[in-house]
Amino acid sequence: NFDIRNLPLEQVERIEILKGSQSTLYGSDAIAGVINFITRRSDHVPFRAMGSVSYGSYGTLNGSASIEGAKGWLYYRAGYSVLSSGGIDETIKDKSTQGGDRDGYAQHGFYTSLSLKPTASFEATAFFRRTGLKGALDQGAFTDELDYTYRQKGWQAGLRTRWDKKIFSVYFLYQYNSIFRDYTDDSTKSRNGFDSYSYGKYQGNEHFLDLYAPVNLSDKIKWTLGTDIR
């Protein structure tokens, strides 16, 4: 599934908490509610550039840069973000503990979207995101490991549309998720207690299709029908 860490914070406009069962619109996983991330979209300005950078404890660097704009019925947005930190040592040190290291983290992300709105009742948006991250791990809450690392690479692409009519609307979404993770522990600097070398690789791909239509039967009654395929 899509890893929420791959969504840059700068791309989020707001977060909605939808309580109660939302299975009709979001599938069986939404029986208890939905956390809905609304991404930013371009305003009616021809061009805008934005950027931010911050630096803090443990060598933590957080930076982003983006451009966006609109021309007629065309909206565009693209951006890049980086987050890196030297990390902390999560293990507890006493007289019997030797060594120790800080487990660093680094993430780079790119995203872009292009929206077309030729009429007030129709809009289509194509989007693409790609993220890579790497970091170091310990063996557990109190067990240090000096050479246990992981990587993650993922990308997401899709198309969403909305078509509004007088008494109903039609929403369509297709997206493809691809994610790759691997974990390596060569145990040359420290032993994990089980083996001298381990490697794990995980690859996942997902197609997601969502189609639904809310119909206003009256001022007090709305009927929603739809389907999703994963």
Image (cartoon, rainbow, N blue to C red):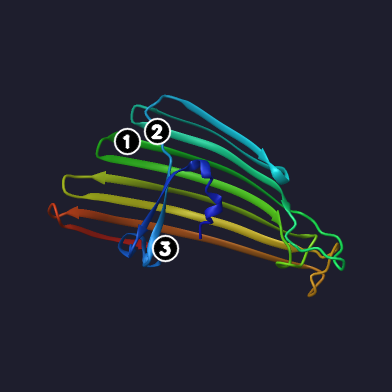
Are discs 2 and 1 less than 8 Å apart at CB? yes
Is 169 displayed left or right of 136 in the figure?
A: left
Disc 1 marks a residue whose amino acid type is Lys
Is 206 displayed left or right of 20 in the figure?
A: right
Q: Is residue 139 above or below residue 80?
A: below
Disc 2 marks a residue whose amino acid type is Tyr
Q: Which residue is mark 2?
A: 75
Q: Nearer the viewer, residue 124 or 140?
A: 140
Between the residue at mark 1 and the residue at mark 3, the CA separation in whole angstroms equals 28 Å
Q: Position of residue 213 (x, y in %)?
A: 25, 54
Task: Determine which quarter of the picture holds residue 150.
Answer: bottom right
- Looking at the image, the residue that sits furthest to the bottom is 194
- Looking at the image, the residue that sits furthest to the left is 218
Please identify the quadrant where the C terminus is shown. Answer: bottom left
Mark seen at residue 117: 1
In what element is the residue under mark 3? Answer: loop
Q: Earlier in the sequence, mark 1 or mark 3?
A: 1
Q: Is residue 144 above or below residue 64?
A: below
